[in-house]
Image (cartoon, rainbow, N blue to C red):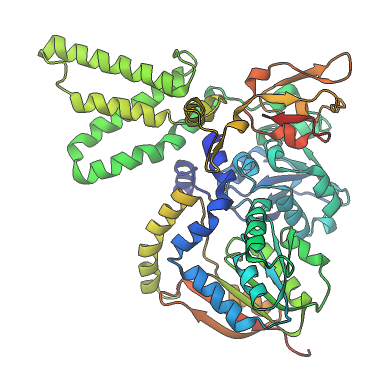
Amino acid sequence: MSSYVYMKILESQPERYDRGIALMSLGGADRCKKKLVHENVRPGFKVLEIGCGTGTMAILAALAGAEVLGFDVSDAMLEVARGKIDDSGMSGRIRLEETGVSGMDKLADDSFDLVMSTLVFSELSHDERVYALRHAYRVLRPGGRLAIADEARPETLARRLAHSAIRIPLLIATFVLTQTTTRAVDGLSDLVLEARFRIESEERSSLDSFLYLVARKEEKE
Amino acid sequence: MVLDWLVAYLFRWLPRSAPTGLFAIGNPDENSPVIVTANFSLTIRRLRRALQGQNLWLLVANSQGINVWCAADGGIFTDNRVVDAIKVSGLVDRVKHRQVILPALSAPGIDLEAIRRETGFRARFGPVYGKDIPAYLEGRKKKTEAMRRFEFGLEHRLDMFVSMNFPIYLLVAAPLALFWPQYFVGYTILFWSAVAFLYLFLDQIPGKTGWGQAFWCATLLVLLWAGMDWLLRGDPFLHWGWLLASFGIFFAAAFDIAGVVSARRADPELLMQRLGFKSFGSLYNDKQLGLIGLDRDKCNGCRACSDICPVGVYGELDQDKKIAFRNRNACFACGACAKQCGQGALSVA
């Protein structure tokens, strides 16, 4: 397919990403990022963000006193992030790298206090999720935490229907307006367990559609 | 299965993901070639059909369910995605060689050197179409001129005909079916005849832009229709609603017809250029509309540009061993050559 207009629309999509996500989650994504940072980041922490996108959460973590390394597969997203980070005055605390999850193999063992990620695992394919979790475990210091917030499929049929009724129109409107979309992530907690983490908490939002998961790498094995 | 295909086909405008990773086609071994593609479900389906009877590895990278060309040009199917696919799939342990073959249309988004640096694999661009892969492999990875070209011919148009227009059709057909069913059949016939006419005779219809061509078609139809009504019923505006609808349908079907089926510049962009817009948000920038430009001093005659140009802009090297244009006007600014030129000699401006 060769629609020239479609190509151009995709090309400019990162600049509309923040608005798209805010619209689709009805503001929930931002609240969730604040909560995640508030509950898991401590001053002096070394934090790795998987898929930092436009840098919203990296800035929040830096403001909370952490040193952040964020990576993202999209250079256009990082371009937006650089602008936002400069504006926030946090550029001394945040390092950005352009790479997909496979770049995690270059990070040292036991070198982070926290690995965090929002709305990224739903965009990764199954094999990429497994890979990212394996390396998240490796780079965390013993006792370090993994915190993930993402879209999830509700567990009961009734809730799934209620969720779809809200989500589908929202999804179409958001894609038309901003070419941003996310997919629900299924069975994430199983993958987290398989990567040898111990799950500390797993919360779901009112309609079950948002998953907030915190897991820990055990002190000693 | 059929339903799944139908949804994928009729809504090809929307992303649709296929599983990623390394897949065996036939019985490949450690010496078999590796073909890389994006995870748009329709692509995978067609590629698998084209590769039947081959023994090779199919490495599917994550392009968020968007097709190769659009995702590469839109900055989604990039070298980072190929690097991820190679490393995450553990390709290193499956083959002895260090080569992968990329789809030619991924060139606007891919830095070959970055793939080599991060993975040790040498990537090269294969043919545009999956159907040419068997012949390409047989011919020791030499591409014929035809393998480099995107065919904006009848076959491509028929492929686009239903799938590009179905969502547009549905936009009006759905409310009609619900609230004004008496107009549904008429609309359906009018819509698909208009679109079929445009797609079949686009090259014969006068006019430079798709919109211009659609306007002449609509005008012709409306004049004939009104004339018939006048002659037979005494009132040229008897079907005034349908006359208006004809203009609407032709315009909607032709919104990006020039870009989609005949590799010309997109009409909405040309309009903005004519209206004097320098840029429109990030969607449009008049700098991206120009012709391809060559800085002859920088060109080293490597021919990377002519290797991946899908519309045959480039010809042979001239007497100074610099690339020469063969058909510069065919360029529709996909940016593949500018991205692949290692010397920075090419730019769209």
Q: Position of residue A11 (x, y in %)?
A: 59, 44
**Viewer-nearest residue: B144 or A43:** A43
Q: Quadrant of the C terminus of chain A?
A: bottom right
**Viewer-nearest residue: B11 or B141:** B11
Most extreme residue toward the top is B231
Say if A202 sits above or below B205 in the image.
Answer: below
Residue shown at the point (40%, 38%) measured from the top left:
B166
How many dots with numbers? 0
Q: Is residue B99 left or right of residue A213?
A: right
Do we see residue B95 in this rendering?
no
Q: Quadrant of residue B291?
A: top right
Q: Quadrant of the N terminus of chain A?
A: top right
Q: Is residue A117 left or right of residue B294?
A: left
Do we see residue B88 in this rendering?
yes
Q: Position of residue B346 (x, y in %)?
A: 75, 29
Residue shown at the point (55%, 43%) measured from the top left:
B282
Say if A127 sits above or below B95 in the image.
Answer: below
Q: Is residue B237 left or right of residue A49?
A: left
Q: Position of residue A211 (x, y in %)?
A: 52, 75
Q: Position of residue B77 (x, y in %)?
A: 66, 47
Residue shown at the point (58%, 81%) measured from the top left:
A38
Most extreme residue toward the bottom is A220
Q: Quadrant of residue B292?
A: top right
**Viewer-nearest residue: B17 or B114:** B114
